[in-house]
Every structure is written in structure tokens, then in C-alpha cells.
Amino acid sequence: MRLKKSMTVLAAMAMGATTALAGTTAATAAPAAGCKTNDLLVPSCGVLWGAAAGGFTDAPRDQALKDFEKLSGRTATIYHTYHKGDEVFPTAAEKAMARDTNQPRVLLLNWKIAYKSSWAKVAKGEQDKRIDAFAARIKKDFPEKFFLVLNHEPENDVIARKGSGWEAKDFAAMYRHTIQRLEAQGVTNAINVMAYMGNEKWMAQKWWADPYPGDDVVDWMGLDSYVSAERGAYHYGQFADLLDRKAKNGPTFYDWATKKHAAKPLMIAEWGVYHRVGKPVDKSAGFNSVLPELAKRPAIKAIVYFDTKHDDQGDRDISIDSKKTSLTAFRTLAANKLFNVTIG
């Protein structure tokens, strides 16, 4: 039976959760009483904790995540992975991570389905074979619920020229077509996430809201956003700043998402605190600012850290352990009982 796609999000959040010892692990920490996920993986209380690790390196992603979990002291309940085109996924390693009974995880599969095509062509059916192959794999051997992101941060790929095939409206059409075809093929366990990019220059565009494909094909709102720990640097700030970016005279992302799409839970699908490579700065202030903001923002139901020693440009270190003080602060954050959510 197909999962219901509309619901009123539970706004309750565990307030004032006490901080556990920094060395506490997911395997030994007792879950907060009653915090479980529903059919759309929305927690009844607390916040889902997740991560992607080893980005832009040759390290196997599953091992990189295990190393991150050991370093941070908590299992990443959401395991974020990235794929494109005709890649065969979930991979055997990803399925093994999702089925680890000692450290339960939910996959967040990020798929650039229009690789070597275009959004417009996908919407017109050019990649239906690609969609159907993915649906067949899911139906055959991956019955577990999983999060699905189609082409995260689409703003960065928009070509705002009529007929380009990459207009904002083409993204919306691509997204709708893909999800509807997956559902028509019998995929019922995908929880769909629309992941925007947290950057003011995109929010200032007249087409910025146009990629949204519709509430009927979106289950979660998502945001990818980062802050710098270097005072005076571009996007210097704390956790609130990555949520509250806005175009001039416009709403913040958090306000826009929670007012325009109030029924949708919000996932921070990528976040991180960075400094320039080779110029380590203490990130404690950024990590220490997370819990107070989550207490004030009940729509946020999941946060997923992106850990890497260098980004795609090679100049930003987003790792949690570039300084000992940073790692200590992150481990304290990770140990908080707010993130003790059981997958239902």
C-alpha cells in the first residue's frame, strides 16, 4: 500500500535535553523515551542525526562514515550518499550499512538523474528506462524505507534561458515526473526530500521558488547550508546563520519553508562549519550553537553533517577534528539525548 503523502507534522520537540558524556555512543545510549519515527520517518520527538563523510576523497564512503561515527561518538542514523545517472544503487555496501542491526541507519540517497541529459528531457520521458531500472532494484531487494533527494541544490544548475532544458520550471517537471513514475512502478518506501542550497544569491533570483515540484510529491523540505568559523570571512557565523540566509528584503529560508510549506518537516540535509584548508580555527562556537537553535525551531526534524578535509574547490576544511577543541565540542553535541530517536 502506498504511503500517505500528506500529514500534519508533529511540532513537539524535546526541550532542555541534558547533555550526555562526550564519549557516549549510539550502541550504549538509551533512546529518549517515546521518540520514534512514523511512516514518513518523521520523529515524534527529538531530531534525527546523520552524516556524509569522506567527500571528495578516494576513501570508501561506508568506511569513512564508520570512522566519522567512531570519532564523533554517535551512529549516523541517516547515512547520506551520492549517485548520478545509471549508477547502480543502493550499493551492496550501502545496503549493509542500512541493515546493521547494532547500528541502525536510514539511507539518504542523493540522485542526479539528469546526468548526461537534462531536466526537460527527463520530464519528457527520455530517462524512463533509468527510472524504471532503479524502481526494479528497490522492489527486488531493498524494502527498507529510505530518503530520496533528486538533484540536491538545483539552483546551482539552473540555466535561466528559455529552452535550455535547465530552467527552474524544468527541474520541477523532472522531479514530478520521476516521483510519479517511481510510484507508478510500485515504489512505496521512498521518502522524498526537496533539498535547496542555502545561498543568498539564489534566493535573490526571481525564479528561486519555481523549482518546487509540489506538496504532493515532496515529503520533507531540505536545506544544504554551511558557515565559516573564520571571523570576517564569507558566511562567517553560527548555526542560526545557515538557517536564516535571505535575499534583500526577503524572508529567511527557515521562515519561507515553514510558512509556505508548513506541513513539511525540515531536514538540514548538509551542514557544516569550515575554515580554509591549512588555517585551522576553533569551530566550537558553531557546534555549541546548534542545540539552542533546534530548541527554538521545532520544524527541524533532522540534521546531517558533511565531513571532509577539503570541499570540491579544495579550499574549505569542514572536518570536525581540525582542532581538538572543535572535536570536543562536536562530541558533546553528538552525545545529546535529543538525537536518541528510534527508527520505527
Image: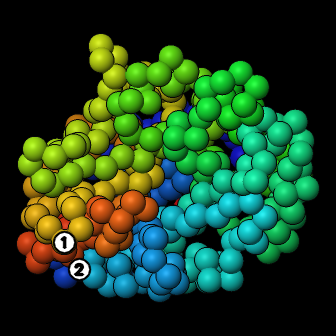
The residue lying at 21 percent from left, 75 percent from top is 321
x, y (%) of residue 295?
A: 22, 43
The residue lying at 45 percent from left, 41 percent from top is 197
Foreground label between 2 and 1: 1
Q: Please give left or right for residue 231 compared with residue 344 in the image.
A: left
The residue lying at 30 percent from left, 57 percent from top is 272
Circle on res. 24: 2
Name the quadrant containing residue 257. top left
Name the quadrant containing residue 54. bottom left
* Depth order, front residue of 4/80: 80
x, y (%) of residue 328?
A: 13, 74
x, y (%) of residue 65?
A: 43, 78
Q: Secondary structure at mark 1?
A: loop
Identify residue type, mark 1. Answer: Gly
Q: Is 330 located above or below residue 199 in the figure?
A: below
Mark found first going from the N terminus, 2 or 1: 2
Q: Please give left or right for residue 209 compared with residue 283 in the image.
A: right
* Depth order, front residue of 245/109: 245
Q: Please give left or right for residue 79 compared with residue 158 in the image.
A: left
* Residue 30 visible in the displayed image: no
Q: CA distance from mark 2 to mark 1?
A: 30 Å
Q: Which residue is mark 1?
A: 278
